[in-house]
Image (spheres, rainbow, N blue to C red):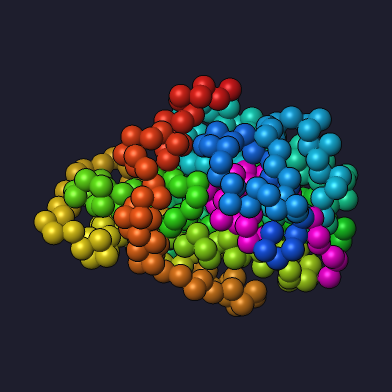
Amino acid sequence: MKSIKSVLVTGGAGYVGAVLVPKLLDKGYRVTVLDLYLYGEDVLDAVKHDPNLQQIKGDIRDRALLEKVIPDTNAVIHLACISNDPSFELNPALGKSINYDAFLSLVEVSRKSKVKRFIYASTSSVYGIKEEANVTEDLVLEPLTDYSKYKALCEEALLREQSSAFTAVVIRPATVCGYSPRLRLDLSVNILTNLAVNTGRITVFGGKQKRPNIHIEDVTDLYVRLLELPDNMIAGKIFNAGYENYQIAELADMVREVVGKEGLEIVVSPTDDNRSYHISSAKIERELGFKPKHTVEEAIKDLHDAFKAGKVPRPMDDIKYYNIKTMLAKKLS
């Protein structure tokens, strides 16, 4: 296997990046984070003095910046994006410029700079709504939104560049859940836990929709592992990465059980959002031996503990926990 010593993490100060970067440093990698730091410049304070960490506040759409940063890099873990359907729909042109146009430049500059490995965080929503009990990587993609459409197009663009000198791998993660120093409270498990702990009332819209989930510790462990595996195990491949597929109503019941708040009410309201996703993660276990170690229930408990310990000040009104509110306030363009 080619030696990987330096890693660029785009979006490294985001929800997943804030948990991933310390793990990479702990493994001895030299890590460069490229991020706009929209959600706080203190996200990586716990490791900011590590001599192997370089933090760059910048935009992945800045090709000159990419050409300056990437040549010193052995591997890229690409997390940066407008990160879900509602955020993308705020400004579709902005979403395309970041999620797709900038991606093409990032891949091109990475390949020309002799980056050895490129790990792309796509999304399990590229499948659209499937009737199959097990949604596997070989099914036809039927993205329902521009967000998932451009994620699918990025997968194609990246895998076209796969070569013996440029190992490309695509991960389609389930919805991530659990505590992070850059916490998001606009993801299904995190939303429900926040409501339960801090309002004593959970509102469920619909409830029958399925959401595949993966604990943030598991998905970040996976990205670390993808740097260590031999090229031939991952080159040009696509892997789902999920764990438990639950209906929203089941998640709400689980939150109520874990939080254990007396009189906690679950209110069900109708919805026209019937997006329902469920994925099989059999391939990644079979081919890479990767099996998640953490459950949704643990994610709920971790969040509950963080709220109770005062690690999440003003969870209901601080916009930094909510992507759409922050994007609107900061007028990202």
Q: Is residue 48 magenta?
A: no
Image x and y of residue 238, in percent: 64, 61
Name the one closer to the observer, 71 or 51: 51
Q: Quadrant of the C terminus?
A: top right
Question: Position of 252 compared to 322: left or right?
Answer: left
Question: Position of 129 compared to 154: left or right?
Answer: left
User: Residue placed at 42% from the left, 40% from the top?
Assistant: 321
User: Residue placed at 70% from the left, 65% from the top?
Assistant: 27
User: Residue placed at 31% from the left, 55% from the top?
Assistant: 308
Magenta stretch, residue numbers = 1-24
Name the one closer to the observer, 140 or 321: 321
Quick check: 21 above or below 71?
A: below
Image x and y of residue 19, in percent: 56, 55
Say if residue 228 shows up in the picture: yes
Q: Quadrant of the N terminus?
A: bottom right
User: Residue furthest toward the front?
Assistant: 49
User: Residue furthest toward the left?
Assistant: 263
Image x and y of residue 58, in percent: 69, 33
Q: Is residue 23 magenta?
A: yes
Image x and y of residue 117, in percent: 78, 57
Residue 29 is drawn in which quadrant?
bottom right
Quick check: 262 above or below 45?
A: below
Quick check: 201 above or below 283?
A: above
Name the one closer to the observer, 161 or 87: 87
Quick check: 246 above or below 89?
A: below
User: Residue placed at 59% from the left, 47% from the top?
Assistant: 44
Say if residue 146 shows up in the picture: no
